[in-house]
Image (cartoon, rainbow, N blue to C red):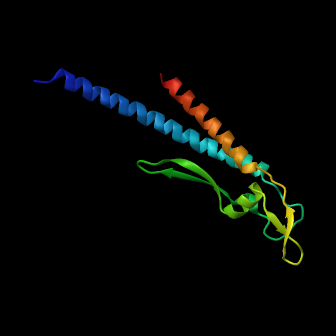
Amino acid sequence: MIDVSEEIYRQFKEIMNEYSENIEEECFLEAKKICEDGKREIKTKTPKRKKSRVGGNYINTYRVINRNKRFERGCTLWNKQYQLSHLLEKNHNTSNQYGARGRTRKNVTPFWKQTEENMVKNFESAVKRIIQKRR
């Protein structure tokens, strides 16, 4: 004899699992899209060298990493030269022509923080839109 409450619980659990998997998949695809958009945006905001010197390919070091494991799904935007990103984002001392540390400070160009805030806002609104669409 089949217990009705167990059958209802099993069907409800199956429906909810399918619902959450669909939302998770759509959120992952949206995160990938937002990371790629952020990569393009940060490439345009990154300060460029005024003088042409060797090794000026800092803009091309941005990467989007996709994680698609069982319990960990998402995307990360990062830069291979994170030390340079930190120096450009934060204020730091400069050195004079003899290598001694001077008291002059470089100008701050907050390009990374603005892009990160935009990406977070876009992802939050996208998740809200996905959930409301599924209702």
Measuring from the top left, give residue 41's x and y in whole percent. Answer: 73, 46
At 52% from the left edge and 24% from the top edge, which residue is drawn? 132
The reply, left or right, for residue 108 in relation to residue 81 is right
Q: Quadrant of the N terminus?
A: top left
The reply, left or right, for residue 94 in relation to residue 66 is right
Measuring from the top left, give residue 28's x and y in whole percent. Answer: 52, 41
Q: Is 42 above or below relative to 91?
A: above
User: Residue placed farthest to the left in the image?
Assistant: 1
At 89% from the left edge and 64% from the top edge, which residue is drawn? 51
User: Residue placed farthest to the front in the image?
Assistant: 103
Within the image, what quadrant is residue 21 found in?
A: top left
**Looking at the image, can residue 48 be seen?**
yes
- Marks counted in the figure total 0
Measuring from the top left, give residue 103's x and y in whole percent. Answer: 86, 66
Measuring from the top left, give residue 86's x and y in whole percent. Answer: 71, 59
The reply, left or right, for residue 88 in relation to residue 19 is right
**Looking at the image, can residue 40 be seen?**
no
User: Residue placed farthest to the bottom in the image?
Assistant: 98
